[in-house]
Image (tube, coloured by chain):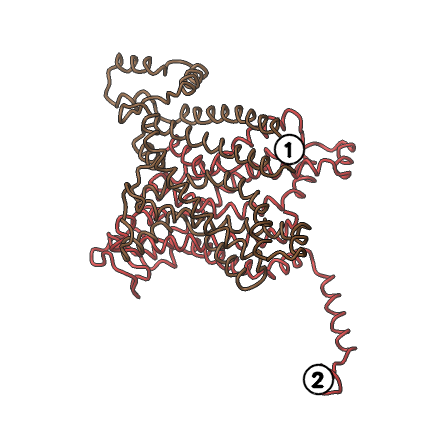
Amino acid sequence: MLKYIVKRILLMIPVLVFMTIIVFTIFFFAPGDPVSRIAGPNVTPEVYESIKRKYGLDQPYIVQYWRFMKSVIEGDLGISILQERPVIDMIKERLPVTLEIGLLGFLITFVIAIPAGVMAAVKKNTFVDYLCMSGTLVGVAIPTFWFGMLLMYFFAYKLRWFPISGYGTIKHLILPSFAIGLTNAAITARMVRSSMLEVLKQDYVRTARSKGLLEKVVIYRHALKNAMIPIITLMGLRLGWIIGGSVALEIIFSIPGIGRLMVDSILARDYPVVQGAMLVLTSSIIVANILADALYAIVDPRIRYS
Amino acid sequence: MITPGSRNGGVYVDKEWVKQQLSEYVEEKEEKRPVVEFLTKLFKHKGAVFGAIIIFLFVFTAVFAPWLAPYEYDKPDSSAILQPSSAEHLFGTDEFGRDIFSRIVYGSRISLKVALVAVGISLVAGTVLGALAGYYGGIVDYIISSITDIAWAFPTTLLAIAFIAALGTGIQNVIIAIALASWAGYCRVVRGQFLSLRERESIQAARILGMSDARIIFGHMLPNALAPVIVMATLELPKAIVIEASLSFLGLGAQPPTPSWGVILDSGKGLIGQAPWISFFPGLMIMLVVLGFNLFGDALRDVLDPNS
């Protein structure tokens, strides 16, 4: 067991290294001259050369990658061209905000998806099941950012229950988290349903029932526990989707998260910030996926990948 | 033929006649060509029919946009600014007095183009790579699958945003970014198919007979591996549409005044309190089109690829 988990975590290293290569290469070969991006269009050749040397842009690709990699390991993601501050500090400010939305979103996902999925599985092929499943079909199709705008219109403009936009209190986070949580709940509910149906077919569920246990106990204490195992891995995989979706929501609700930072930096051509944000986001998603995978093995001792 | 008779609650059933009818039906079914059988199975799904209707309407709108749109998509009209839905302007007008309905009709062309081209490129690239990995195995497989696994670990939207950051905005770059961000799925599926197909006796016989690799791959293996690829492509089309809309919404894709659905949604963002219809209708269209493709794709999977 421990061996498997250690192996899984060690396997993470080449993936992360390869990811840094991809992110570095994307921005290395980006059209446009990075030096004039930093220096502006009107510079003397001497200043141009000195900037080029200062940022090490006169070195070949491999050397530049090596220097990039070394500073990333030291926790240095470069300096923002626009704000002239370390990128890592900017990310440290913004990332927690995005994580707040993400975590609240996951919470909403669970609160909605688990009861809906269990109910659909238990009442398979009844009206309740069809209703839940049609709901998920629509939920999967709704674009998250559009759903966020609908929520904003109804709950902030019409009913005035929540502030329209901004950041500061928990009330500011509810609508964007709900937008992401509810659309994510749609796909999760389908998974819960199919996982639950699989478990309900098992012998031990029949045994529990024939022991005379209450149906509620059988379903929630015995079946659901095991049905949740594949959902854990799914949630690890959904993290990337959640962060991708929160980019647009941060723009709509004017929330200073990392997604907004990234889009603003792309539009301002502040590439070190984009690169740093990409690096932090993708590596945390990769780590989350692998941890979810390892957790899967801990929770379900039957699983052994060779 | 049912005639009044003795049993069955006073209804007499002519058994011979029923048998005859049934036998005719069975024979008829056996004679059906595979395509007909496939379509019969597919359209037994209510979802497939509903999905196909939406897809048809979407494609029809995109193809015949100039005939369907009542106004020019980029013509401002100072006498009709921010009007809600009416008989004259079905979906209302925006802050320049442009007709939202016409803009959405033209916007379907962008969605369709991006989806088809991006999915086409990633499908071909992923399939070829997957076929090479699965057919040759060994070091080729190792290199291709390592890259694929890593590309697969990236979230598609974020990866597309990264490519846009490097390539710059615009529809062309959106297509490239989506294609670059989504080929890995096809590669994994085709590789898996090829690994199992490779062991088949017919394929090994073809090898022994000295058939060229290209002929075995394209003539014998690929046709057998296509079903899951087609299903996957159907389900990737709506994803490409949503990513295009999101990127354009963020200002990273199509630029105004291009009537991309994402651009229209974005133009209504600041006016959502006064003129919610600007953003409401393009979002609704995205939802319907995605729903249509998903329903059709799910049904297609049930029929073509029942094992998955």
Query: How far across and down, in percent of the image, does residue A164 sit?
Result: 27, 49
Q: Nearer the viewer, residue A125 or B124?
A: A125
Residue at 48 percent of width and 38 percent of height: B179
**Left of A56 or right of it: where is A218?**
right
Q: Residue furthest left?
A: B79
Mark carried by residue B9: 2
Q: Mark 2 to mark 1: distance in Å?
A: 62 Å
Provide the secondary structure element on which disc 2 rests.
helix
Q: Position of residue B281 (x, y in %)?
A: 36, 56
Q: Position of residue B174 (x, y in %)?
A: 41, 39
Please give the residue where the numbered disc 1 appears in the rendered image: A305
Identify which residue is drawn at 38% across, 49% down. A178
Q: Amino acid at mark 1?
A: Tyr
Q: Position of residue A210 (x, y in %)?
A: 68, 56
Q: Colour of chain B?
A: red
With B301 as the anchor, is A160 left or right in this view?
Answer: left
Q: Is residue A84 above or below residue B274?
A: above
